[in-house]
Image (cartoon, rainbow, N blue to C red):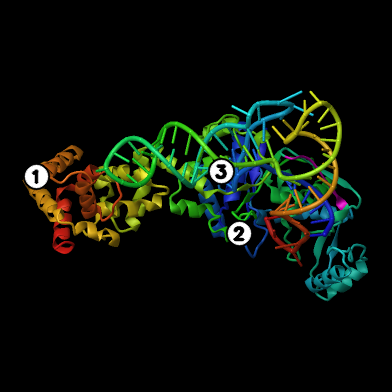
RNA sequence: GGCCCCUUGGUCAAGUGGUUAAGACACCGGCCUUUCACGCCGGUAACAGGGGUUCGAAUCCCCUAGGGGUCACCA
């Protein structure tokens, strides 16, 4: 039985790279019919927050990356939050201490900093020199009496070759001599991530550790702990990083690194999942669009790239607009509603009554959308009586025949008592053409500008049928009164 | 700086010793169209450099260069 996990620390929102890591874990678990676990690594008391944890959970759910076990779900290997597992870590720390594989260290941050500087001056690399390594009990008691709170360090065995067998990179070797005795328990008694993950992964029977490449360099430290404790090693798979435009690890500096941001902008979860899956992984065929089920079926570590990928917003945009065009109209309309409410175009309580009409509105503009949040700007004309006219178009309305067009339209509108649909709109335009003798661009452009204020937009007949007779008249009257003389 | 990873067009990428080096996004051009968008058709554009191995290297080996990651009482 394969068991994998996503173990974020709740110190920020769900990162786009984290989302992909979670996705790969999820895909692998589903494919192998294994278990996907969500565990929260909140050992950093200062930076961790409940709010952050909630957002991570919400966004994973939003993306349909569902876990089988862990926070919010329970399971037989809990608790699933590090801070609730402190008593568990303690047991293993004591074992290490007893066996002489770890020791207390009383060096203060100031001392460490000084030491660091000295080493740097001598041209050596900064690392812990092992000052407290062989401390006697008496010395410890003396320090303790002075009120010093120790950290616990792991005694790194020297001259050992540690090899990581990575599913994506193959065999990667490290020399333990390059690693100083590192802290496993902080002076506040809380273990450090590098130690806690090992205990957690072992106890939760994780079979495959799938995580970002930034953890590769820390893996030998963890392996040392696995060995010291006599634990069996899981398989490792380090997926390449997602880089920003400047080719450095995607971070706050790149602006939108949080899933939440994309959610707010109106990217569809399906599009994000599809896009993320293709960043670092590629299918065997030429298929571009995948449902999550197809991804589950086709995913494989063999086809995960070793090299980092740059986050390409253009491609995400393209993919998102594809999903907007291809998803059921009903669904897209529902998703657009919040943006329309936010813009003040419509009230929450009138949505149901106007839903069929809203669908028409959405249908006419969806092809031109990249993200859902663009919907108010694209549909403004259907919700407002007054138009804002783009300055560069004013001159078109000054032309001689424009007044004639308005009058002809108004007259025809006045004479119809039928509901205006696409067809009727077309007929009206034809009649206007006949009575005024104006046709082609000279007819459509001024009309478009008068009705929408812009030179581009959806098909005019559609615009008319969606606006309806009343609003059309208002609009034309307004233009007649204010825009032309 | 030590250690580790990586290197095919602007970007994502296929490719596992013999290919005209795919495909997609972006970009450019054309068609469609009352406008924009969509859609369709076409185009520009790549194996980081240098040595080997081989009849033959994008593919294997070495070196150089470049990029990234990591070396915390962060994760």
Q: Is residue A76 left or right of residue A256?
A: right
Of residues A345 and A254, the one drawn nearer to the viewer in this rendering: A254
Highlighted range, magenta = A169-176
Give the residue at the far left of this rendering. A415
Which of the two discs, 1 and 2, sits closer to the camera? Answer: 1
Q: Assess whether mark 3 and mark 2 are in contact (beta carbons under 8 angstroms).
A: no
Which of the two discs, 2 and 3, sits closer to the camera? Answer: 3
The answer to whether residue A343 is above or below residue A205 is: below
Residue at image mark 2: A11
At mark 1, the secondary structure is helix
- Of helix, strand and loop, which mostly describes the magenta segment? strand
The quadrant holding residue A322 is: top left
Q: Chain of mark 3?
A: A
Rate crowding at label 2 as few (under 14), some (14 to 19) or many (20 or more) other CA atoms within 10 Å. Answer: some
Query: What separation in Å lies between label 1 and label 3 (alpha carbons)?
Result: 57 Å
Query: What separation in Å lies between label 1 and label 2 (alpha carbons)?
Result: 69 Å
Q: Which mark is residue A276?
A: 3
Pick whichever of labels 1 and 2 is earlier in the sequence.
2
Which of the two discs, 1 and 3, sits closer to the camera? Answer: 1
Evaluate whether label 1 is on the same chain as label 2. yes
At mark 3, the secondary structure is helix
The quadrant holding residue A148 is: bottom right
């Amino acid at each position: 039985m394969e068991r994998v996990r996503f173990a974020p620390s709740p110190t920020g929102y769900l990162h786009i790279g984290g989302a992909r890591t979670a996705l790969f874990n999820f895909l692998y678990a589903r494919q192998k019919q294994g278990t996907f676990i969500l565990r929260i690594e909140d050992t950093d008391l200062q930076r961790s927050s409940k709010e952050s944890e909630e957002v991570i959970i919400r966004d994973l759910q939003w993306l349909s990356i569902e876990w089988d076990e862990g926070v919010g779900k329970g399971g037989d290997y809990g608790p699933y939050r590090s801070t609730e597992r402190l008593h568990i870590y303690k047991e293993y720390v004591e074992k290490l201490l007893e066996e002489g594989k770890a020791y207390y260290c009383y060096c203060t941050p100031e001392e460490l900093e000084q030491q660091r500087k000295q080493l740097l001056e001598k041209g050596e690399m900064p690392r812990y020199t092992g000052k407290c390594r062989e401390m006697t009990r008496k010395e410890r008691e003396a320090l303790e009496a002075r009120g010093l709170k120790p950290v616990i360090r792991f005694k790194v065995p020297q001259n050992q070759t540690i090899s990581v067998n990575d599913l994506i990179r193959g065999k990667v070797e490290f020399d333990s001599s390059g690693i100083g005795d590192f802290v496993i328990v902080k002076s506040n008694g809380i273990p450090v991530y590098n130690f806690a993950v090992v205990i957690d992964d072992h106890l939760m029977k994780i079979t495959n550790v799938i995580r970002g490449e930034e953890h590769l360099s820390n893996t030998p430290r963890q392996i040392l702990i696995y060995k010291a404790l006599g634990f069996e090693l899981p398989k490792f798979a380090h997926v390449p990083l997602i880089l920003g435009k400047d080719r450095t690890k995607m971070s706050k500096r790149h602006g939108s690194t949080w899933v939440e941001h994309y959610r707010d902008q109106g990217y569809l979860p399906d599009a994000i999942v599809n896009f993320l899956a293709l960043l670092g992984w590629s299918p065997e065929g030429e298929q571009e669009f995948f449902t999550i089920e197809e991804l589950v079926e086709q995913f494989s570590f063999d086809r995960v790239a070793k090299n980092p990928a740059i986050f390409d917003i253009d491609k995400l945009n393209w993919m998102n607009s594809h999903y907007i065009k291809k998803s059921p109209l009903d669904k897209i309309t529902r998703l657009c509603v919040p943006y329309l409410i936010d813009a003040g175009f419509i009230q929450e309580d009138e949505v149901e009554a106007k839903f069929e009409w809203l669908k028409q509105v959405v249908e006419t503009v969806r092809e031109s959308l990249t993200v859902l949040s663009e919907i108010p700007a694209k549909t403004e004309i259907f919700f407002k009586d007054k138009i804002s006219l783009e300055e560069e178009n004013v001159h078109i309305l000054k032309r001689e025949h424009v007044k004639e067009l308005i009058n002809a339209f108004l007259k025809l509108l006045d004479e119809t008592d039928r509901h205006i649909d696409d067809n009727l709109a077309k007929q009206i335009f034809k009649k206007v053409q006949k009575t005024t003798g104006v046709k082609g661009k000279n007819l459509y452009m001024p009309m478009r500008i008068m009705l929408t204020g812009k030179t581009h937009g959806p098909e005019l007949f559609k615009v008319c049928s969606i606006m309806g007779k009343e609003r059309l008249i208002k609009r034309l009257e307004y233009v007649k009164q204010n825009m032309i003389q």
